[in-house]
């Protein structure tokens, strides 16, 4: 059984399209990097970081930057906690705030999603509690 030249070209194109579609699907639906696997750009106290971000907020909000902070909890809700009244951590899915108390010192890690320089508020997501 011999295939014509036209049939061979058609089969080749179909194979290229299938491989391209599969590669595109894998790229578009790649799993997100876990916060534990990301490099920490800053580790320290929440007060020190607030001073640092006020100097140059653009450098901290460009790209995905992960920070580890230690500070006192000044507020909490179902989805997150506030440190020093200026930093809001949206906790990773499945993390509960029930055992956390206002005034408690906590060590937490999260990804920066934005900074409001008018209100001087920093927002982070995917936060995980390292130490209570």
Image (cartoon, rainbow, N blue to C red):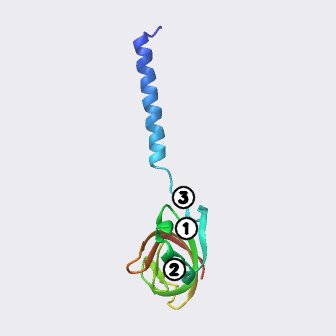
The front one of 118 and 71 is 118
| Foreground tag (2 vs 1) | 2
Give the CA separation, mark 3 to mark 2.
Answer: 26 Å
Circle nearer the N terminus (2, 1): 2
Name the residue tied to disc 1.
66
| Residue 50, numbered label | 2
Residue 23 vertical position relative to residue 65 in the rendered view, above or below: above
Q: Quadrant of residue 88?
A: bottom left
Frontmost of labels 3 and 2 is: 2
State the residue in front, 108 or 69.
Answer: 69
Q: Residue at x 51, y 54 (%)?
A: 31
Residue, disc 3 = 33
Going 48% across and 77% down the picture, which residue do you hit?
54
Percent x, y of residue 120: 42, 80
- Say what secondary structure mark 1 lies in: strand
Sequence-first disc among 3 and 2: 3
Residue 35 occupies quadrant: bottom right
Which sits earlier in the primary sequence, circle 1 or circle 3? 3
Q: Position of residue 64 (x, y in %)?
A: 51, 62
SS class, disc 2 = helix
Tag on residue 38? none
**Residue mark closest to the camera, 1 vs 3:** 1
User: The C terminus is located in which quarter?
Assistant: bottom right
Mark 3 crowdedness (10 Å alpha carbons): few <14, some 14-19, many ≥20: few
Residue found at the very far left of the displayed protein = 118
């Amino acid at each position: 059984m011999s295939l014509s030249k036209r049939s061979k070209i058609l089969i080749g194109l179909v194979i290229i399209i299938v491989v391209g579609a599969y590669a595109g699907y894998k790229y578009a639906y790649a799993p997100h990097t876990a916060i534990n696997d990301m490099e920490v750009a800053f580790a320290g106290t929440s007060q020190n970081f607030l001073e640092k971000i006020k100097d140059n907020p653009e450098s901290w909000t460009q790209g995905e930057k992960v920070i580890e902070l230690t500070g006192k909890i000044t507020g909490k809700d179902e989805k997150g906690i506030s440190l020093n009244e200026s930093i809001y951590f949206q906790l990773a899915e499945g993390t509960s705030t029930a055992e956390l108390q206002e005034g408690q010192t906590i060590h937490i890690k999260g990804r920066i999603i934005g900074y409001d320089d008018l209100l001087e508020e920093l927002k982070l997501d995917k936060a995980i509690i390292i130490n209570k």
